[in-house]
Structure formats: C-alpha cells, structure tokens
Image (cartoon, grey):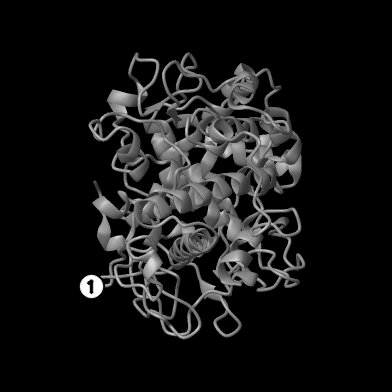
C-alpha cells in the first residue's frame, strides 16, 4: 500500500484503500468493498484541462493568509456552527470506516477469514489494530496499574503539556492506522482516543472484577458504543443538520427501522463504501481546513502545512510532537466556557496551503482541488445534476453554479464534489451540507452503523451514554474529551 499522505484530505492515501479502479468501480457486480449508490448514472468525464482550470478558481485569494485564532466569527470565512476540531474528527472517522481486514473485531468474530471482504464499520480498528494478541506493541505491558497490563494503550513521550503518540526510534508512530499520524491535529486526536480507552478501562476495572482479555473486551465495547453515539448525536447533526438525522434515525430506532428509511444506499449482503461518498461527498472537509491553527495557550498561528523542514513552522505529520506542543482541546471543541477557533465554511474556496501541497507528501499535481476533480473523473462519477435528478431534487442552475464561464463543458453538468460544495454554500451559507451532499453523507454513515451487527444500534438499540460520561445528560466530543482529561 502506498505511504499515507495528507494530499487527499479526508481520504488520504494515494489510492482509496481496497479500491481497484477497474475491478471495483466499473464492475458489473452489485457490490464489493467499494461500489456505487447510483450505478445507472452516466459518468461525467470532461477534458482534464477544463478540470484543471476549474481547480484554479477554487482557492482563496492571495493574502488570505491568516485566521483569527479565537471564536466569535471575526472572519467571514468562519463557520459559526462548527468548531475547527470537527474537521479533523471527520478525517479520523474516514480512517475508521476505510476498512482494515485485520481489525480486532474481525478476529473476534471470524478468525479464519481475515483476508475476505468485510463491511466497513465504526469499530475503531484505527486505534485497536489487531488487538492485544495480534498487535501487542500497541499496548502497555508494564502499566503503573497492574490491572491494565496488556489492556491499556502504550502512550508516547510527555512533551511537558501533553503526550505524543508512541513512536519508534525513527519517529514513526506505533498505531493501528499510520494515516492517523499524517498531520499533528489528527495525530493528537488519535492520542486522545488512546487515552479515552485507557480511562474507560480503568473505570471498568474499578466497577467490575473483569481482568485481562475480558476487561479489554468490555472496555473496547464501551468505547465503541460511546464513539458511535457521539458521531450520531454530535458530529453528524453539525454536518447535515439535526432534522435529516432525526428523519433517518428517530429516537429509539432499531437497525431495521433505520435501514427502511434509507432511500439511496442499499446492498444485498453487506454494506459497501460508495464512491459517490468517498470520492466526492465526504471530501467536503477539505473546504473546512483553515490556513493556520492555535494549538495551545503559547503556540499560536501555525500554518497547517508547508514545505519547510523547521519542525516549529507547520503541522506536518509523521514526526515527534515538539516540546510544549501538547494540544489544548479548548481551541478545537467547545470545552468549558472557552470559545474554540472555528472551521471554514463548506464552500468552493479552499485555504491557500492546499493549492501547493508540500513536496514530501504530494507529487504532481500539488493542488488538492485539482487532485480531487481529476480523481472524480477517473472514477467515472456522475455529475452533481445527474445525482440530484436521481434523488428527485431540482438541480442547481448553471447561473448559480457559476462555472460555465470556465468552460462550456460545465453547461448542465458540474463535477459532483464541486456541486456538493456549492450546494452547501448556496442552501445553507456554508454552515452545513445541502440536499444532495447531506443526504449522501447521512445515508452512508447511518447505513454503515445500521448494517453493522455489532454496533450499539444493533446490539443495544436503547443504549444511552452512562452518567460517568454524560453527567448532564449530553454526550458529544467535548464530553468525551472532558471525561478523558478530567
């Protein structure tokens, strides 16, 4: 597998994991690891040079080189409804549902079929890897609390105000999915989830007599259920709106009820990853990336990435966390009373650093917009207007899309990724996805959850977060972080 890189944003490898272009995308089979939601729609394949020209229009103007660090919406680019941390939580989620057939869940349930196709799931294999028996290097064999021997995750170096990921002598992270080290924000999220598991394991050890593998399994189950709940009740409503989430997954719904509410995401044997989602709709997060970030009370205004080899100049990944660079999550999520810095709005303008990605992680083309548009063409995605029509939604007009001046190839047809970004901009002022994008994202994420026989929705549909995690009856990413670091 190619080395992971930041160049593909929410889908970061040089190739979608497990996605062979001819075998999966254009296969006559109903499904595979990857497949299509709209299999009968024609591909939109304009000339490459027209897509390159469109990409050149998709970046902020020169001089838009700084983001105000605090909350409050001082900058019109900022989304007042989505703190900056949710951009990278979305990336973390993507790496979780990009299925790894060596996940510990598969070993627990089908140890003789590790290399067969299995469905993508919200099982956190990106942190658990193969579990303590298969990947013991991920787990602490000499913890200060003997009850957690081989149960708790190994943590990395103390940097004075935080912890790094565990790393080898060359600085590479020892984690379940190497892509979660590709920038310092997602690597610190990975570290937060490691510590969340450790805190849950300690709680279970205090409340029960479970030890060893049984303690690990129960802690893992609780972590997964609370993570899934947070995605449904905190992350997804911010991205697609609460009304759509409630429509697809009403209170106390069962898996079968959720599946019956899906209009466009269907499968025969097991859920698959639709390319309309992975190559277009879920790349909405690229437009949410800021130019720079404040990470703690001292370290401020660090550019997201650059070609500089100075470790203090950017948030490039695959390296040790610098001293005093431990993240204070109040700058990324609404923790306590502090106003976090905000994400950018979901629209067709990307931050300038994405126009010229670092040479160490991107060869030609270095423009993220160009890479996304060309990838959509390569995988034969339908146009945004075709998808809208297939969903019974009136498509955006050419005048609203505003790209026919770039090329007449865009008359009546726009690349699906661009269309979804523009739709969010026009329908919701960039604060959330629009009709097409929101529906694709919501149906896939909730469909994957409902199609997983081991999710909380399937195993325990009446599940709600325990009081220890949600003392005020609310549980989202801020509460997860508060529980972890209290």
Left or right of residue 157, residue 303 in this image: right
Where's residue 148, x and y in %?
Answer: 39, 65
Could you tell me if residue 7 is visible in this image? no
Which quarter of the image is occupied by the C terminus? bottom right
Image vertical order of residue 198 relative to residue 161, above or below:
above
Image vertical order of residue 409 relative to residue 482, above or below:
above
Residue positioned most to the front = 209
State the residue at coordinates (26%, 29%): 116
Q: Rate crowding at label 1 as few (under 14), some (14 to 19) or many (20 or more) other CA atoms within 10 Å.
A: few
Q: In the rendered image, which quarter is residue 258 located in?
A: top right
State the residue at coordinates (36%, 55%): 179
**Total numbered circles:** 1
Q: Nearer the viewer, residue 329 or 414?
A: 329
Give SS at disc 1: loop
State the residue at coordinates (67%, 40%): 240
Q: Which residue is mark 1?
A: 170
Image vertical order of residue 453 relative to residue 346, above or below:
above
Could you tell me if residue 157 is visible in this image? yes
State the residue at coordinates (28%, 67%): 172
Where's residue 92, x and y in %?
Answer: 48, 52
Left or right of residue 377, residue 136 in this image: left
Q: Nearer the viewer, residue 247 or 358?
A: 247
Where's residue 106, x and y in %?
Answer: 33, 37
Left or right of residue 6, residue 249 in this image: right
């Amino acid at each position: 597998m190619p080395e992971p890189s930041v160049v593909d944003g929410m889908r970061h490898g040089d190739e979608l994991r497990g996605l062979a272009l001819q075998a999966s995308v254009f296969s006559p089979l109903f499904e595979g690891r990857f497949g299509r939601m709209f299999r009968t729609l024609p591909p939109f394949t304009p000339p490459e040079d027209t897509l390159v020209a469109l990409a050149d229009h998709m970046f902020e103007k020169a001089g838009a080189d700084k983001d105000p660090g605090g909350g409050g919406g001082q900058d019109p680019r900022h989304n007042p409804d989505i703190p900056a941390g949710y951009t990278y939580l979305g990336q973390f989620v993507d790496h979780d549902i990009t299925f790894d057939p060596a996940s510990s869940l598969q070993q627990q349930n089908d140890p003789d079929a590790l290399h067969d196709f299995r469905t993508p799931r919200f099982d956190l294999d990106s942190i658990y890897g193969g579990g303590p028996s298969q990947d013991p290097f991920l787990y602490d064999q000499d913890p200060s609390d003997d009850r957690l021997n081989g149960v708790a995750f190994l943590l990395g170096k103390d940097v004075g105000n935080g912890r790094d990921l565990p790393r080898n002598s060359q600085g590479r992270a020892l984690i379940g999915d190497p892509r979660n080290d590709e920038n310092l924000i997602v690597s610190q999220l990975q570290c937060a989830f490691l510590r969340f598991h450790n805190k849950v394991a300690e709680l279970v050890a205090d409340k029960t007599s479970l030890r060893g593998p049984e303690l690990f399994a129960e802690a893992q189950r609780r972590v997964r259920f609370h993570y899934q709940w947070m995605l449904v009740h905190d992350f997804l409503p911010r991205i697609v709106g609460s009304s759509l989430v409630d429509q697809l997954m009403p209170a106390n719904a069962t898996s079968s009820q959720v599946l019956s509410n899906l209009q466009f995401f269907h499968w025969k044997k097991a859920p698959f990853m639709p390319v309309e989602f992975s190559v277009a709709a879920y790349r909405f997060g690229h437009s949410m990336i800021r130019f720079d970030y404040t990470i703690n009370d001292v370290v401020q205004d660090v550019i997201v990435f650059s070609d500089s080899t100075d470790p203090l100049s950017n948030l490039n990944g695959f390296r040790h966390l610098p001293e005093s660079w431990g993240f204070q999550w109040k700058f990324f999520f609404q923790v306590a009373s502090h106003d976090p810095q905000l994400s950018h709005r979901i629209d067709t303008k990307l931050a300038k650093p994405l126009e010229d990605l670092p040479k160490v992680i991107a060869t030609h083309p270095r423009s993220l917009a160009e890479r996304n548009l060309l990838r959509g063409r390569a995988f034969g995605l339908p146009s945004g207007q075709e998808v809208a029509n297939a969903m019974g939604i009136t498509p955006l007009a050419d005048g609203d899309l505003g790209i026919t001046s770039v090329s007449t190839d865009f008359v009546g047809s726009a690349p699906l990724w661009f269309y979804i970004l523009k739709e969010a901009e026009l329908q919701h002022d960039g604060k959330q996805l629009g009709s097409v994008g929101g529906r694709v994202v919501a149906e896939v994420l909730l469909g994957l959850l409902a199609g997983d026989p081991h999710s909380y929705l399937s195993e325990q549909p009446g599940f709600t977060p325990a009081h220890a995690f949600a003392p005020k009856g609310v549980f989202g990413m801020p509460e997860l972080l508060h529980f972890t670091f209290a």
